[in-house]
Amino acid sequence: MKALVTGVNGQVGSALLRTCPEGWTCVALDRAALDLSDADAIARIVDAEKPDLVLNSAAYTAVDRAESEQDLAYAINARAPGAFAEALAKTGGRLVTVSTDFVFDGTSGTGYKPGDTRNPQSIYGASKADGEIAAGEDSIIVRTSWVYAAGGANFVRTMLRLMRERDELRVVGDQIGSPTWATGLARTLWGLALADRPGIWHHRDAGVASWYDFAVAIGEEALAAGLLARLPRIVPISTSEYPVPARRPSFSVLDVTETRAALGDENIHWRTNLRLMLEEEKALG
């Protein structure tokens, strides 16, 4: 069995390669091997490889820059999933594509369910919402949030760097969501793919947090792991005190009940997974 994996230099793509099941061959595609903004290139590689699966973890994720680079964001996040779905309809095979909590507006007081109405508030969120529609009902679409991994470009590693450099950090405390370890997400993507469960699904680690809560936990766990020599002061601020071009949802917790029931596994708390990630980070030196 063969899977094409996009975005292999990213956090989720590299995790998908590491968790590739026995009996599967993973064809690793980075930006040099496949330009996701080129629909014809997508059609050609699917026709040549005829994969059983396409695991599309690549995305345009520069949330603020997307406000001024709309065409590129839509090409990668919206049109590429559609191109994969169209090509696979001809060759056979299933598309698995990763989406985001940013397809919601953040006004809910309870966890968003897969069938809840999309109402993105940013170009990034809108491009991902259009990507879900383009992928179609025959695809496996997995929304997730606040992804991080050892060695990647993410909030955890940014906080570690800033905590070493500064005596005080100011972190937004009124945006609520759930951190997600890329390795756990990769296992869910493979699980849904092997079970052949098309539709929209949600994955995140258990528990909720603000970015401030997450930063405090990063500091505490990194100090305990010996990755920090001391803790700086961490101050919660409001979203209005940290203006950025793109609007973020103030509440983007995803309800994962259906996913966990489908896979028959447990939802591990984000702080437990944070410790595992920091152990990997320490091993990287």
Image (spheres, helix red, strand yellow):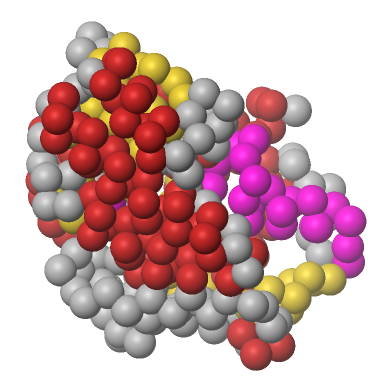
Look at the image and tell me in which quarter the N terminus lies: top left
- Image quadrant where residue 241 sits: bottom right
Residue at 48% across, 75% down: 122
Indicate whether 233 appears above or below 83: below
Residue at 63% across, 69% down: 68
- The x, y position of residue 255, in whole percent, is 24, 65
Side (left or right) of 122 relative to 201: right
Indicate whether 46 appears above or below 57: above
- Image quadrant where residue 53 sits: top left
Indicate whether 22 appears above or below 43: above
Side (left or right) of 72 relative to 131: right
- The x, y position of residue 61, in whole percent, is 54, 55
Q: Is residue 157 magenta?
A: yes
Residue at 20% across, 69% down: 113
Q: Which residues are magenta?
A: 141-167
**Residue in the foreground of this view, choosing between 40 and 67:** 40
